[in-house]
Every structure is written in C-alpha cells, then in structure tokens.
Image (cartoon, rainbow, N blue to C red):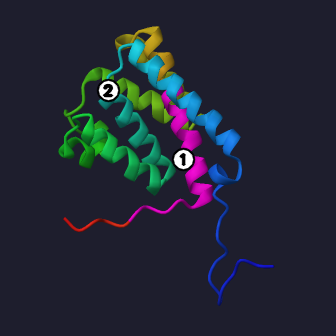
Amino acid sequence: MSNRAHGSPPRRIFIDKQSPKAFHALVQVSEAVRATASEAGLDRTTVELINLRVSQLNGCAYCLDVHTGAALRAGESPRRLGILNAWRDTGLFTSAERAALALAEATTDPVNAGAQASAYEAARRVLSEDQISAVIWVAVTINAFNRVSIMSKHPVPPLRDT
C-alpha cells in the first residue's frame, strides 16, 4: 500500500530509525572523531565550523540547524556564523580555521584534485598531522550525517515562541 495521502509526496524512510544498528555505529564513529579532534588540539568551535561549512555545501538544513546551536553553545559568534559561507572573503577566521575549512571543503568535494592539493598544502603550514587527520575525519563524519538527514528528509523543528 502506498504511503501517499491525497496526492502528497511519499514520506521518506528515516534510515537512522529503519537501521538503528548502522546509525548507532555512525554515532560511535562521530564520538571517536570528536575525541580525536580534541586530543589533536582542535577546539569545539573549529569542529562546529567544519560541521557547518560541510553542511552548507551539502545543503543539509537539519544538520545546519543542529550545528548552529552547537556552535553557539561552544561560544562561536553569530557574526562569524552568518558570514561562514564567505569565509575566504573576510579576516574573521584564523589561519588554522581557514586551513581547516579549506581542507573540509576539499574532503567534501574530492573530485577537484587541484583544490585538494592546495588545501592540503595550506593545512600542512599551520596544522599538525594529528589536526589534519582530525579535520578530515570531522568532514568525513558530517558528510555521512548530512547524507542520512538529506535522504531521510529529516525535518527542521519549528521555532519556539520565546
């Protein structure tokens, strides 16, 4: 039987709920990556900037919502969050953050070998090998979560009255 009601589009399967063991494994990877990033000396705001920038590139509204809140709770400024999409055109980000963002973008779009080489070279100048590895793992992990949410069409919760 179809899950269409009166011509509405079919509901997507929430694959995190449909396959909870697989999703739980992804959550465990994410927790290990978060610990790896911390051990490498990446602060929580840098990790959240990576999560947000990758989610912007992928167009994942659900993850943008989740990680905007996480970034604000970690102490990130609304101004920098608002301009993140144009980070290259500002002086608001440190050289380490810029290197991390470029490397995260190259991880998200691996087809562009030139951008990948350039991002990796820039990262080598300001990040340790442990930090480079952590940045790539953060980008890989949020890319996976973006795909789960995008393919499941996870809804962004409505705003609450304040």
Direction from residue 100 to residue 107 in the image, left or right: right
Give the x, y percent position of residue 88.
30, 37
Return the disc, 2 or 1, that comes first in the chain's sequence: 2
What predominant SS class does the magenta segment belong to? helix
Image side of residue 135 versus residue 11, left or right: left
Q: Which of the pair 132/64 is nearer the observer?
A: 64
**Element marked by disc 1:** helix
**Residue 139 included in the magenta stretch of the image:** yes
Tag 2 residue: 97
Image height of 51 relative to 37, above or below: below
The residue carrying pointer 1 sits among few (fewer than 14), some (14 to 19) or many (20 or more) residues within 10 Å by Cα, namely many
Q: Residue at x 64, y 78 (%)?
A: 9
User: Residue type at mark 2?
Assistant: Glu
Q: Residue at x 60, y 48 (%)?
A: 147
Q: Which residue shows up at 53% across the image and 59% down it?
A: 154
**Pointers 2 and 1 in contact (CB under 8 A)?**
no
Q: Which residue is mark 1?
A: 146
Q: Position of residue 85 (x, y in %)?
A: 34, 46
Task: Out of 91 and 128, give the one closest to the viewer.
Answer: 128
Q: Residues within 10 Å of mark 2 (few under 14, many from 20)?
A: many
Locate the C terminus and report the quarter of the image it occupies.
bottom left
- The answer, for residue 111, to whether it is visible in the render is no
Callout 1 amino acid: Asn
Q: Residue at x 81, y 79 (%)?
A: 1
User: Is residue 117 shown to the viewer in this render?
Assistant: yes
**The residue tagged with tag 2: helix, strand or loop?**
helix
Magenta-tinted stretch: 137-157
User: For residue 86, which quarter of the picture?
Assistant: top left
Position in image of residue 114 (x %, y %): 54, 28
The answer to whether residue 152 is above or below residue 26 is below
Residue 63 lies in the magenta-colored region: no
